[in-house]
Image (cartoon, grey):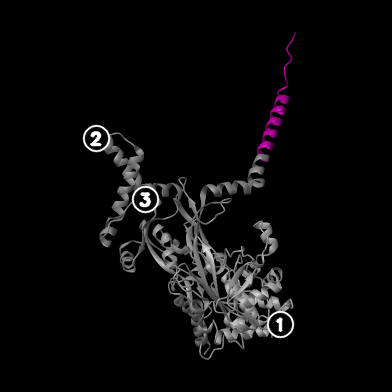
Amino acid sequence: MKQQQEDPQVRLVWLGGVMGALFVVLFLGLVTRQIIQYSHFKHLEERQSLRRVLLPAPRGIITDRNGVVLASNKPVFSLIVYLGELRGEFHKELIRLVKEAREQKRTVDRDILQRSAIGNVLKAALNPVEKYLDEPIALDADRIERHLNEKPLLPYTLLDHLTLVQFARLTELLKVDAPVQLQVRSQRVYPEGDSACHLLGFVSMREPEVDESDLKTFSTKDQVGVSGVEESFDNTLAGQMGHELWIVDPSGFKFEPTQRVKAVSGTPLQLSVDVRQQKAIEKAFGQKIGAAAAIDIRTGEVLALVSKPSYNLNDLVPHFGTQVQEKINIHSGWLNRAIRGLYPPGSTFKIVTALAAIDAGKLDLDETVNCRGFLEIGKRNYPCNKKSGHGPVNLVGALEKSCNVYFYTMGLRTGPDAIMAKAREFGLDKPTNIELPDETSRMLLPTPEWKKRTLLEPWYAGDTANVAIGQGDLLITPLQMSCLVASVARGDTKTPVTILKKPHPLELPRKAYPEGWARVIEGMKAAAASGTARLAHVNGLPIAGKTGTAQVKSNGESLTLAWFIGFAPADDPQVAISVMVESISPDDEYAGGTIAAPIARSFFEEWQKDRE
């Protein structure tokens, strides 16, 4: 059979079709890669060739209400080296060491020789610096190698905290384009040392959180607030970090800068505290343990917030060791007792009992109660603060002399539920919501229902007697007691507090005193003039106050608390304060009138001096 021959023209058509199809596929592939997937591949290219270096921002300064600087920044001078710029020298030295090892027929361990090469090059580069400073510079091979691998774009710190003289000398020695350079960074500093330390808080050096979804990012440690105002207003104080964009070589080292955005300093913060009044209270405390809170009654601005013992904030920056930590741990120095310490308020709570009894219609304002030095409740005698008794006392006299028997009597008439309802009305069951971290919410206003549910025990008349004079399971913070007395002074029940100084603070409402309320204020004035709170007296400044003494158990030891709460001027209330002092010595005859009231007097004296 004769073989049929294909037409060459048909072959060309088929070949042209195949070539056309391949061209279409190639064209569509190019369109997809160059146009449709352009952004994706551009992003991959940037991730491979670009690196971001974050630049920390100086923190905003913190001042008191009068502009006194409480936290600022100081320059810290460091000697640094850009290890990436010495890679060529490292490589040359490594080749020399390998060659030398082979000539001497020694085992060639490239890791060991690599470290030796880096060390030799750095020592040679630092030799003139060491001679200039007249001190050796220690090199940590492990840290250097880790830095090269993990942070090749960042400088490695050789010496930190250079003196100003050292910095000036090295400025003359080091060339502008040398790998070894000087660096200036900011570090937090607290000019007042330990004053208001719990209020201000401090910063710690931490790695910032970075988003590496678009570019690989390098950053040095930055200052982050970890307590107090530094923590609660960290976003405001921290500012905005700057950054640099660098094109890097295949090894990940700097090749060429493409962008630099400067860091923006943090926003300054003005607090409502007055450092002079703060320091007056701190000085009056001396070595005592306790807390105090002073408030501007008209605005709720905190004028002083003290917790003792204190610590020097500068000892904690940029970091602190075990020795500093152990020193602060003694007597629980980290604890901000003003907002986290929970204590029975003692006789200062008698103000609440009195107002609850008045509202419940259980207290006749002119009635007298005969105090024989104790009140028999059930089969037990409950003592007064004066063993021989006060004799017949009315409301004003009972507050002036802090007569327990009078308030036992009124408390039993009123009942625990009504007393605690009045305490809740003053907000003693809730945090004040001051702008500070970690304010406790564990305050306790005990009731019969609470005792049955929690302790599985019945409520006794003796429990009512105890809470009526601020004892028993009652637990309140010093700041809450300051809010209480500020509210009483305004004829109100709530005092919102703030630690911020605002240009135009809102005036809190002041109400006319009902007759019963006015009698309570009269009793507080008598206590400060001639009664248990008379050691708070300041010449020319009428004061209304109330003292208290409470006993608790702490770690198996008897703990005595001395309290004072009060406000001034008594006829035109402007400032209020609460003071609480702890003692664990059984020999201390602690009482609010002898221990806490004089501390409050120091505040009132400073406030009066500032006012004049």
Query: Could you say which disc has been placed on residue 364 in the image?
Result: 1
Q: Is residue 430 among the parts visible in the rendering?
A: no
Q: Amino acid at mark 1?
A: Asp
Quarter of image, res 398: bottom right
The answer to which of marks 3 and 1 sits earlier in the sequence is 3
**Which residue occupies the foreground of this view, 262 or 604?**
604
| Alpha carbons under labels 1 and 2: distance apart | 107 Å
Q: Could you tell me which secondary element the residue under label 1 belongs to?
A: loop
Q: Amino acid at mark 2?
A: Gln
| Residue at the disc numbered 3 | 86
Q: Main secondary structure of the magenta part?
A: helix
Residue at 54% of width from left, 82% of height from top? 533
Q: Which residues are magenta?
A: 1-27
Q: Could you tell me which secondary element the residue under label 3 belongs to?
A: helix
Q: Could you tell me which secondary element the residue under label 2 belongs to?
A: loop
Q: Answer whether residue 293 is magenta in the image.
A: no
Q: Answer whether residue 25 is magenta in the image.
A: yes
The answer to which of marks 2 and 3 sits earlier in the sequence is 3
Return the x and y of residue 406 as percentages of the image width and height: 63, 78
The answer to which of marks 1 and 2 sits earlier in the sequence is 2
Return the x and y of residue 185 as percentages of the image width and height: 43, 64
